[in-house]
């Protein structure tokens, strides 16, 4: 379908906090916020893949907080 949901959210004391990265959330993004960037992909009608990155918003842009995964990921299952 064409429902993209949201592309991420704030991260803090709770696992999921405002702002919600959607077209309707008008929260200003400011230095000091920690955000997740998590685009998702639905395929085969019953499978969902989500890649999540955590970033710290800085006065000059953003700093990636997520440690990069190895290029060769294990296949499970």
Image: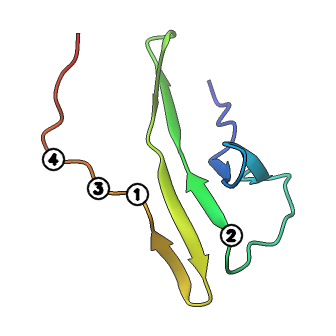
Q: Residue furthest bottom?
A: 60
Q: Are marks 1 and 3 in contact (CB under 8 Å)?
A: yes
> Quick check: marks 4 and 3 in contact, CB under 8 Å?
no
Q: Few, some or many C-alpha atoms within 10 Å of disc 1 (few <14, some 14-19, many ≥20)?
A: few
Q: Position of residue 70 (x, y in %)?
A: 18, 48
SS for dot 2: loop
Callout 4 touching callout 1 (CB < 8 Å) = no
Circle nearer the viewer, 4 or 3: 3
- Kindly state the secondary structure of the residue where label 1 is placed: loop
Q: Earlier in the sequence, mark 4 or mark 2?
A: 2
Q: Nearer the viewer, mark 4 or mark 1?
A: 1
Residue 9 place in picture, x, y as percent? 68, 51
Of callouts 4 and 1, the N-terminal one: 1
> Which residue is the site of mark 1?
66
Classify residue 64 by image quadrant.
Answer: bottom left
Between the residue at mark 4 and the residue at mark 3, the CA separation in whole angstroms equals 9 Å
Residue placed under numbered mark 3 in the picture: 68
Q: CA distance from mark 2 to mark 1?
A: 15 Å
**Residue 29: quarter of image:** bottom right
Q: Secondary structure at mark 4?
A: loop
């Amino acid at each position: 379908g064409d429902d993209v949901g949201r592309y991420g959210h704030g991260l803090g004391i709770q696992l999921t906090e405002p702002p919600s990265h959607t077209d309707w959330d008008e929260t200003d993004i400011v230095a000091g916020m920690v955000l997740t960037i998590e685009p998702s992909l639905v395929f085969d009608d019953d499978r969902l893949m989500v890649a999540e990155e955590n970033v710290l918003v800085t006065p000059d842009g953003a700093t990636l907080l997520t440690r990069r995964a190895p290029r060769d990921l294990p296949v499970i299952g």
